[in-house]
Amino acid sequence: MFGKFEWARDLGNPILPPNTGSKYDSTRCMNPFVVCIADEYRLYYSGGDEEGCQRICLATASVDDPTKFKRHGVILNLGGVGAFDAKWCVLPCVHQFGDRWFMYYSGHEGSDLGLQSFPGIGLAISEDGIHFERYSSEPVVTGDQTAEFSNNRGVAGGGSILEDVQADGSVRYRMYYTVASGVKSDDVRIDQEKHCAVCHSDDGIRWTDHQLIMSPQKEVANEDVAVAAPFVWRDGDVYRMLYCGIGTRWGFYSISEAVSTDGYTWDRGDGDENITLAPNPGCEWESQMVEYPCVVQEADQLRLFYCGNGYGKTGIGTAIAKIPCA
């Protein structure tokens, strides 16, 4: 069941590297989330500046050439002093609710608590998917909402949102996200511990029924530390996920696949057979790590957007995989 997708990296990678001299993305382009609107790709990402701050930015490209993006700058700036997103706004996830666009993002408050410095997932709303305003100065999802981590603080978005049509015709939404449970330590297994989770909503604002769906596997060296950033989509009668694993094998992220019949219980196969994209020692921009997957469908192929070394320090790349015939 695994190895279904054979990704061919674009020879022009990275397609969106940091922009030297820019005031908003000169040091990092990370966390790609792509939405297709008519004949345009909108690439939402987090840009890092020279002072170490990160903001949500936008770039666009024609669907005819999704490797040449035009940058449009910051679309969501930092929160106020003392806010949960005072230092970083990262990991955008954009979904249309009715005639409005909701953008979920993760905040870093500016403290020195490692993963516990990410205290919430915030929400910004737009009429056009370009001009966003915060719904609230407080997060809509926090890291203490699963039964297993009721005393936890760290949380990260950047996953995906699916729609489940109910018997009465209403829609219930499910958001896949990351519980960032690690605490500062010299041991990477403690410092970077993360788990994949899901929650549910009827309106995109109030999220309930938080459940863990995937945790690190101690016996698998590419994900014995963390599993994170679950990007989930439906493929016929099954659910497919690309996610990031941190393990003692590389010490950094690689990207793996998982499959499910319901989107809650996931099959990762045996050992590391489900690795779908690994660090590439022969390519300078992604020799250390690959992470933050986002997938869009293009006719008979899938297009993957992802990051390389240094959590976006070398930028964003793309790869394609053919969809096998049924």
Image: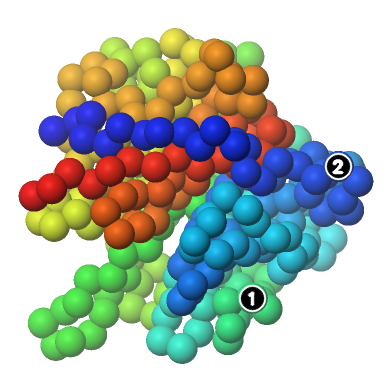
For label 1, the crowd category at 10 Å Cα-Cα, with few meaning under 14, some 14 to 19 and many 20 or more, is some
The answer for how far apart the CA atoms under marks 2 and 1 are is 24 Å
Q: Is residue 107 visible from the viewing direction of this image?
A: no
Residue 141: x and y in percent read 50, 61
- Please indicate whether residue 145 sits to the left or right of residue 168 in the image: right
Residue 296: x and y in percent read 39, 56
Give the amino acid type for the residue marked by disc 2 in the picture. Thr
Question: How many numbered dots are placed on residues in this image?
Answer: 2
User: Taking 218 as reference, is 309 above or below it?
Assistant: below
Residue at the extreme front: 64
Q: Nearer the viewer, residue 103 or 218?
A: 103
Say which of marks 2 and 1 sits in front: 2
Q: Which residue is mark 2?
A: 20
Q: Which residue is mark 1?
A: 130
Quarter-of-image position of residue 30: top right
Give the amino acid type for the residue marked by disc 1 in the picture. Ile
Identify the secondary structure beneath mark 2: loop
Residue 60: x and y in percent read 62, 64
Who's the residue at 58% across and 86% down the image?
127
Q: Nearer the viewer, residue 236 or 196?
A: 236
Who's the residue at 76% across and 42% down the image?
18
For label 2, the crowd category at 10 Å Cα-Cα, with few meaning under 14, some 14 to 19 and many 20 or more, is few
Q: Nearer the viewer, residue 234 or 37?
A: 37
Q: Quadrant of the N terminus?
A: top left
User: Taking 11 as reference, is 72 above or below it?
Assistant: below
Report the coloring of the rendering. rainbow
Q: Is residue 95 visible from the viewing direction of this image?
A: yes
